[in-house]
Amino acid sequence: MANNCGAAIAITGSPTVLRDWLASVLEPRLDLRVVDGADFDVELPLPMSILERLDPVPRHVGPEDHWGSQQPDRETRWIMQGFGRVYIETVFAYGPPEVAFDRIAAASPELTFTITYSEIGFGEIGTLAWAHGHRILDTRVNLN
């Protein structure tokens, strides 16, 4: 059984850009009018892996080689927090898939991605951030 890494992912940008990004990467049948102009949290009905949706594994490549993680995220909740912010709560195996987010951020340079995580099994907490398509922050603390 993998060590669980609890993570909170914030995706921010202008409300228009973020809405267009959501429309392009999420369920095509999801009616985003529910979040237009919302200034409160709205949980999006998306029981999907962020990795499988935003950075699918190519054929003939293993997940660990592609994502830097053996398996996709699970227990994922997408929450729209009005005014240009999406918040995602999820669980990764061992740690956040940094390689995958390097690609995800590069593909959407107009958005900022921030991951705050806690991996109690290895005793590590940290924050990673990407802006303008590049990693700008990598802070880790070993609690052991």
Image: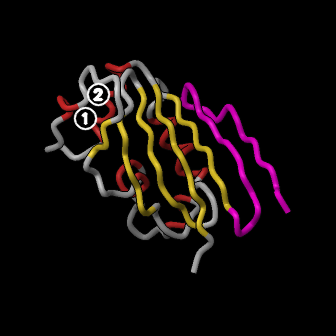
Q: Looking at the image, which residue is at 34% across and 23% down? A: 39
Left or right of 120 on screen, residue 97: left
Give percent across and percent down for residue 76.
Answer: 41, 56
Is residue 132 shown in magenta? yes
- Distance (Cα) linking label 2 and label 1: 5 Å
The image shows residue 134, relative to residue 98, as above or below, that is above
* Marks 2 and 1 close (CB-CB < 8 Å): yes
| Type of amino acid under label 1 | Ala
Residue extent of the magenta highlight: 120-144
Image quarter (top left, top right, bottom left or bottom right) of the C terminus? bottom right
Q: Looking at the image, which residue is at 80% across and 50% down? A: 141
> What's the mark number on residue 20?
2
Is residue 138 shown in magenta? yes
**Magenta stretch, main secondary structure class:** strand
Give percent across and percent down for residue 53.
Answer: 35, 52
Q: Looking at the image, which residue is at 44% across and 45% down? A: 88
Residue 16: quarter of image: top left
- Secondary structure found at label 2: helix
Give percent across and percent down for residue 33.
Answer: 17, 29
Mark 1, residue position: 23
Q: Residue furthest bottom?
A: 1
The image shows residue 15, relative to residue 34, as above or below, that is above
**Toward the viewer: 144 or 58?**
144
Colour mapping used in the image: secondary structure
Image quarter (top left, top right, bottom left or bottom right) of the N terminus? bottom right
Q: Looking at the image, which residue is at 35% across and 34% down? A: 41
| Type of amino acid under label 2 | Asp
Give percent across and percent down for residue 104.
Answer: 48, 42
* Crowding at mark 2 (Cα within 10 Å: few <14, some 14-19, many 20+): few
> What's the mark number on residue 129?
none
The image shows residue 141, relative to residue 4, as above or below, that is above
